[in-house]
């Protein structure tokens, strides 16, 4: 297994409903370490750039409007197999299909307001962490 980094976003519905601590706790109790974090209200340009891979999808405009509707909490998580582990903790994109005990099964409001985002592969994790954090803002467990 490899030590990986992945990007996590607690979306506007999660921040609005005061879920930050409960979500962070799930990361930490499952072996993921928060090595960078920041609360931020995304501009449309930031949200469009971040989700550029979905530009052609019918839900793109609504997604950008939703992601800019309130502040989010953006973090870099580090751990063994962090990308897959984070996705397992989040559950499926559609909360109706998410496994019991996952963040989305427990908290998500809809397929759009699904409380959390996580990178889905090493390439997207590298792009997404770099979109929001410089290397000097990520405090690896190895260097603490
Ligand atoms: P996320 O993991 O952040 O990646 C893309 C987001 O688009 C997804 O979570 C949802 O918030 C949103 N979305 C809205 N509608 C859909 C859909 N039909 N399929 C996939 N994602 C959707």
Image (cartoon, rainbow, N blue to C red):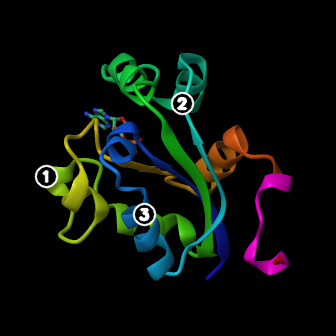
Image quadrant, ligand 1: top left
Residue 30 visible at all: no
Residue 2, quarter of picture: bottom right
Q: Position of residue 123 (x, y in %)?
A: 64, 50
Q: Which mark is residue 41?
A: 2
The C terminus lies in quadrant? bottom right
- Circle nearer the N terminus (2, 3): 3
Circle 3 residue: 21
Q: Which mark is residue 96?
A: 1
Q: How far apart are labels 2 and 1 at the CA level?
A: 28 Å
Residue 20, quarter of picture: bottom left
Q: Residues within 10 Å of mark 1 (few under 14, many from 20)?
A: some
Query: Magenta region: which residues?
Result: 136-143
Identify the secondary structure beneath mark 3. Answer: helix
Q: Position of residue 70 (x, y in %)?
A: 43, 30
- Circle nearer the N terminus (2, 1): 2
Q: Residues within 10 Å of mark 2 (few under 14, many from 20)?
A: some
């Amino acid at each position: 297994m490899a030590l990986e980094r992945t990007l996590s976003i607690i979306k506007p519905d999660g921040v609005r409903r005061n879920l930050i601590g409960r979500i962070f706790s799930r990361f930490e109790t499952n072996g993921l370490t928060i090595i960078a974090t920041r609360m931020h209200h995304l501009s449309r340009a930031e949200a469009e750039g971040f989700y550029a891979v979905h530009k052609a999808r019918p839900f793109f405009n609504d997604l950008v409007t939703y992601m800019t509707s309130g502040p989010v909490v953006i973090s870099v998580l580090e751990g063994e197999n962090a990308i897959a582990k984070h996705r397992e903790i989040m559950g499926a994109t559609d909360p109706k299909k998410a496994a019991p005990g996952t963040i989305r099964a427990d908290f998500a409001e809809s397929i759009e307001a699904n409380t959390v985002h996580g990178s889905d592969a090493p390439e997207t994790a590298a792009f997404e962490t770099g979109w929001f954090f410089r290397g000097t803002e990520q405090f690896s467990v190895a260097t603490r």
